[in-house]
Amino acid sequence: MCVCVCVAASVYVYVCVHVWNIDNGKATDMKIVSQVISNKDGEGYVCLRAEEGEDMWHAYNLIMVGDLIKTVTMRKVIQEGNTGSISSKKVKINLKIDVKKVDFDPQECTIRISGQNKEENKYVKIGQYHTLELALHRNFTLHKLCWDTVFLERLTEATDIKQQADLAAVIMQQGQQAMARVCLVTGHMTVVRAKIEQSIPRKRSGRSGHGKAVGRFYENILQSILRHVQFAPHDHHQNNNNTPQKGNSSRGQKKPKSGSKMSMKSHSSGGYDGDQKKKSSGKVKCLVIASPGYTRNEFYNWLLAQCSKRDLKEISEHKSQIILAHSSSGHKHALNEVFMDEAIQQKISETKAASEVKMLKKFFHTLSEDPGRAYYSYPHCLRACELGAIEVLLVSDSLFRSCKLEERKRYVALVENTRDAGGIVKIFSAQHLSGQQLEQVSGVAAILRYPVPEIEDEVDMSSSSDDSSSDDEYSNNNNNNGGDDMMMMMGGV
């Protein structure tokens, strides 16, 4: 995994980390407990168990309105005693609900599902509404009327141990109000795991308040990295020799000093303190520290000094996996430009995030230099697919979450037809910066094998004919209505 630290004139720090399982230090995958899917029409069910927060994102993309979910949940039950007294208690029940609403919290990695009960039991009647929350390490059964291609691919990806994240990032900006964000960037989303805020007094001659405040701020960042970043074993990853030897790693021994405001989210599986000596292999292949100016260098020098002073071997032994980079600001969106840098891409080329950013960069470059080979929006990509001209199709996964079944089917068919014609399909996560950037251009785009400039004119003509047919239909309706009115008037006379 890689870690990026971006710094600016005000101290904002985001630590974004590509890791597979940072909370318990194990690289686990979602487990399929049982599975029955018809080869005829695709109807069936799959019983799953989420092992970590990343699995919840996959589950969120699998569960749609109209599906059936069966799992254990808690429900508050009100009971009336023989004397007329009323009491309430929470009972554990097994419910099967018809999904009406699905909410996902990317910060806590939790899913809340609301719907109507489909199987009557002692406490809940059929048709009653209930909201349940999917929990880690607890089985749930998902039934669908049709497990289409995209659903099956998502299921395979969620249960494949090889689909692991490997990039970490820290973003910070320094100023009078220092702020930091420690994020976990998995293969499909970026989750903020720690927020650090601290006031930094201005430099004044004869006063040491500024230096001490910066030191506390750096210490809090270090503890956050130690808590959430786990480097891959050295013998499994060889970095380039020209990689800047600056960075961070995984485990610490000194508690952060008081006097700063540090907010860290705790997750259901729990975290571990930086002081704890947890012997487990991580997946982070590199750590990128980026910032405007020289803040990244100052933090890196401070980090090396602490490694030497406190014998932080888990950081010092991975100096070659740390990369320094420039960013325009310390905000989260600055990670996009950091990963776009070709020099950075070469050093993080083994990570999944880098491949997505590289493909998106290729699309925008083609759109600028050879517009006949790059198109976006569904009508343009559909026409290119019909011609068999798509080399790479880029699609945001948010398009597959449409509540309109027909709309989802359109994009599933586009993906299948592109693959049948020998094209490559890249599905981008809407929780990643690259996916969010793709959504700004309709959420679907294509790089063609050869220029097809006439697509633009064909789509425009098709749109014009649709508009004119709508106008004609409106005009005919008005004429018919007018004729009816005239007949009524004549009849009245």
Image: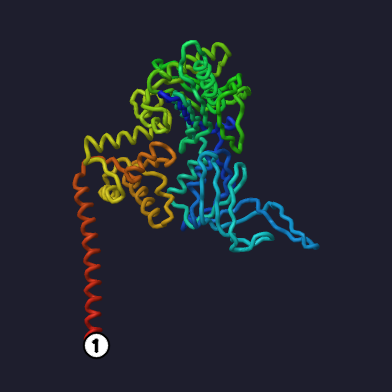
Helix, strand or loop at mark 1: helix
The image quadrant where one finds the C terminus is: bottom left
Q: Pick the residue in front: 7 or 371.
A: 7
Q: Residue furthest right?
A: 83
Identify the residue at horizontal 60%, vertical 31% (top origin).
271
Residue 269 to residue 76: above or below:
above
Is residue 5 visible to the viewer in this orientation of the structure?
no
- 242 to the left or right of 227: left
Q: Is residue 24 visible?
A: yes
In the rendered image, which residue does mark 1 sit on? 491
Residue 367: x %, y % from top left: 25, 38
Quarter of the image for residue 357 reads top left
Q: Nearer the viewer, residue 472 or 53?
A: 472
The mark total stands at: 1
Location of residue 338 by image quarter: top left
Specify whether 345 is left or right of 86. left
Q: Position of residue 457 (x, y in %)?
A: 19, 50
Residue flagged by tag 1: what amino acid is it? Gly
Q: Where is residue 413 in the image (x, y as percent from the top left)?
A: 36, 52
Q: Where residue 213 sits in the image (x, y, percent)?
A: 52, 19
Front position in the image: 34 or 379: 379
**How does the figure colour the protein chain or chains?**
rainbow
Image-based side of 417 in relation to 17, left or right: left
Residue in the picture at 47% in, 25% down: 285
